[in-house]
């Protein structure tokens, strides 16, 4: 298997995983509805940043610890579960507050560099604290590193393939949401979005905490 074949083969698997609805999709969709395109893209780039770090770590063998150490896996799993539950509980709390919500001041919406950085950090943190992502990369990437190629460069290239596919998918979600933004940003719909997203995040967190490898 040469480099081109490895990239194409991995792209097929990555594409299938990308379009399956999951935690990343929930985060980006929620940001697109309640905060707008900039925050949705910041969240998506954060998700991709986490994936890139996992991909490089897997290529170098660092994340292999997760596959062999039950203690390391459990510690990261519980940290990730707590983070997801906290995010979900925060969304639910905002949605049930008595303060009125408007399309100009939706929950979590803000302007400025720090706010975009927070959206990026939310996406990156969610991926980095999910050991399932690390285990996926450490299980898959070594299989797609051709003999004689640089593990670091190949790992980064494979992760970038996943990132490009993910960004294309997120862009479809964000653009579709933008087209219907007038309806989707109504206060009632925003509250429902936060409640559904919050419940989903708590569910993801609980599943991560109590499910084994």
Image (spheres, rainbow, N blue to C red):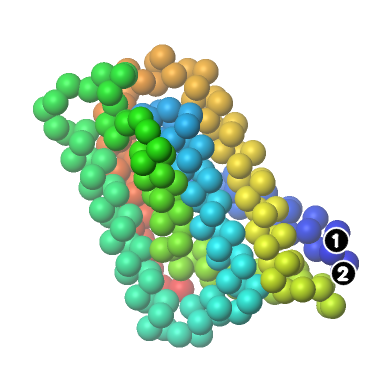
- Res 26 visible: no
Residue placed most toward the observer, 47 or 208: 47
Q: Residues within 10 Å of mark 1 (few under 14, many from 20)?
A: few
Query: Dot 2 surroundings within 10 Å: few (below 14), some, or many (20 or more)?
Result: few
Residue pictured at 22% horizontal, 33% vertical: 95
Q: Is residue 172 above or below residue 180?
A: below
Task: Say which quadrant the N terminus sits in.
Answer: bottom right
Element assignment for label 2: loop
Query: Quick one: which residue is furthest to the front in this view?
Result: 113
Secondary structure beneath disc 1? Answer: helix
Image side of residue 167 versus residue 114, left or right:
right
Q: Residue at the left extreme?
A: 98
Residue linked to disc 1: 5
Q: CA distance from mark 1 to mark 2?
A: 6 Å
Q: Position of residue 141 (x, y in %)?
A: 68, 69
Counting from the top left corner in percent of width and height, residue 171 is at 59, 34
Q: Which mark is residue 1?
A: 2
For residue 154, above or below residue 62: above
Q: Residue at x 11, y 27 (%)?
A: 98
| 201 shown above or below 100 | below
Give yes or no for contact between labels 1 and 2 (Cβ–Cβ under 8 Å).
yes
Residue 3, percent across and down? 84, 64
Residue at x-position 41% and y-position 14%: 182
Kindly give the residue lying farthest to the top in the view shown. Answer: 182
Q: Nearer the viewer, residue 145 or 143?
A: 145
Tell me if 95 is positioned left or right of 154 in this view: left
């Amino acid at each position: 298997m040469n480099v081109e074949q490895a990239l194409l083969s991995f792209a097929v698997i990555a594409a299938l995983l990308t379009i399956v609805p999951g935690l990343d999709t929930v985060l980006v969709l929620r940001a697109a509805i309640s905060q707008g395109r900039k925050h949705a893209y910041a969240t998506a780039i954060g998700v991709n940043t986490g994936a890139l770090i996992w991909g490089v770590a897997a290529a170098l063998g660092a994340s292999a610890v997760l596959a062999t150490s039950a203690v390391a896996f459990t510690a990261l799993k519980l940290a990730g579960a707590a983070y997801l539950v906290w995010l979900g509980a925060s969304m639910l709390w905002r949605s049930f507050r008595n303060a009125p919500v408007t399309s100009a001041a939706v929950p979590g919406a803000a302007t400025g560099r720090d706010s975009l950085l927070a959206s990026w950090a939310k996406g990156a943190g969610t991926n980095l604290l999910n050991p399932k992502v690390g285990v996926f990369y450490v299980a898959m990437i070594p299989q797609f590193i051709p003999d004689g190629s640089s593990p670091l460069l190949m790992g980064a290239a494979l992760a970038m393939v996943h990132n490009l596919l993910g960004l294309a998918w997120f862009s479809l979600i964000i653009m579709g949401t933008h087209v219907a933004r007038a309806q989707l940003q109504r206060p009632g719909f925003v509250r429902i979005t936060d409640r559904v997203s919050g419940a989903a995040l708590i569910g993801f967190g609980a599943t991560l905490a109590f499910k084994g490898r």
